[in-house]
Image (tube, grey):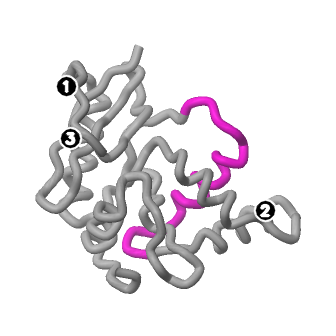
Amino acid sequence: MTFKSKYITPEGFGDIVMESDGKFLTGLRFEQCKTEFDMTDDLPVFAETIRWLDIYFSGRQPDWLPEYKIGFTSPFRIEVLEETSKIPFGKTMTYGEIAKRIASSRGIAKMSAQAVGGALGWNPLCIIIPCHRVIGADGKLTGYGGGIKNKIALLELEKNRDHI
C-alpha cells in the first residue's frame, strides 16, 4: 500500500508530494499538476520528512536524513544516486563528472553523461538525493524532473548562483 501526503513549500517553489510504504519514505516529488489523492498525514516518516524539509527550506542543510527506501532499480541507477548524494549543499557537479567517477570506480575508461542524466530523471527522492545540483558540461542548467523553475529556486536557496 502506498500512502501520500503533501508538503506546502515556501513561496517560489512548487508543493511536494511525499510517498511512503507505511514505514519508509519512498517518494518525494514536486507536484507538477493538481492531483487528487487521499491524504495520510499521521505517519511518523512524514513527520520526520516535514521536519527535514522545514530545515532545508529555511536555508540550511539538515544533518540527518529521513528513513527512506529506494524501490527496485538497476545497479547503475543506484551508483548514480549514491554519487549525486555526495554533492555538498550549495555546490554543483556536472553529469560528466558523475560519469567519470562511476567509470573510475568500475575501472573502465569512459561512462556516458547522458546515461547519468537518464538515471537522474528516475530519482524518486528529489532534494534528499540532490539531482537539482547536477548541471550541464557548459555550466548551464539542464532539465529537471521537478521543473526548471524549482531547480533554479533550490540552487538560489542554497546560495549557489554561479549557474543561474
Q: Which residue is mark 3?
A: 7
Mark 1 Cα within 10 Å, few/some/many (few <14, many 20+)?
A: some
Image quadrant in which the N terminus is located: top left
At x 22%, y 66%, the residue is 59
Quarter of the C terminus within the rendering: bottom left
Cβ–Cβ under 8 Å for marks 2 and 1: no
Q: Give the residue at the far left of this rendering.
A: 11
> Is residue 77 located in the magenta-colored stretch of the structure?
yes
Q: What amino acid type is highlighted by mark number 3?
A: Tyr
- Against 139, residue 37 (above or below) is above
Residue ranking furthest to the right = 108
Report helix, strand or loop for mark 1: loop
Disc 3/disc 1 C-alpha distance (Å): 10 Å
Residue 76, x across and y down, in percent: 71, 48
Identify the mark at residue 41; answer none if there is no mark.
1
Q: Quadrant of residue 19?
A: top left
Query: Where is residue 116 drawn, in percent x and y?
Result: 64, 59
- Amino acid marked by disc 1: Asp
Quadrant in the picture for residue 46: top left
In the rendered structure, the answer to whether residue 121 lies left or right of residue 61 reads right
Q: How far from the left and from the top, in percent, is residue 88?
A: 45, 69
Q: Which residue is disc 2 drawn over? A: 105
Q: Are marks 3 and 1 in contact (CB under 8 Å)?
A: no
* Residue at point 13%, 56% (across, down): 10
Q: Nearer the viewer, mark 3 or mark 2?
A: 3
Mark 3 or mark 2, earlier in chain? 3
Give the Cα separation between the discs numbered 3 and 2.
37 Å
Q: Which residues are magenta?
A: 71-91
Residue 153: x and y in percent read: 26, 67
Assess whether mark 2 and mark 3 are in contact (beta carbons under 8 angstroms): no
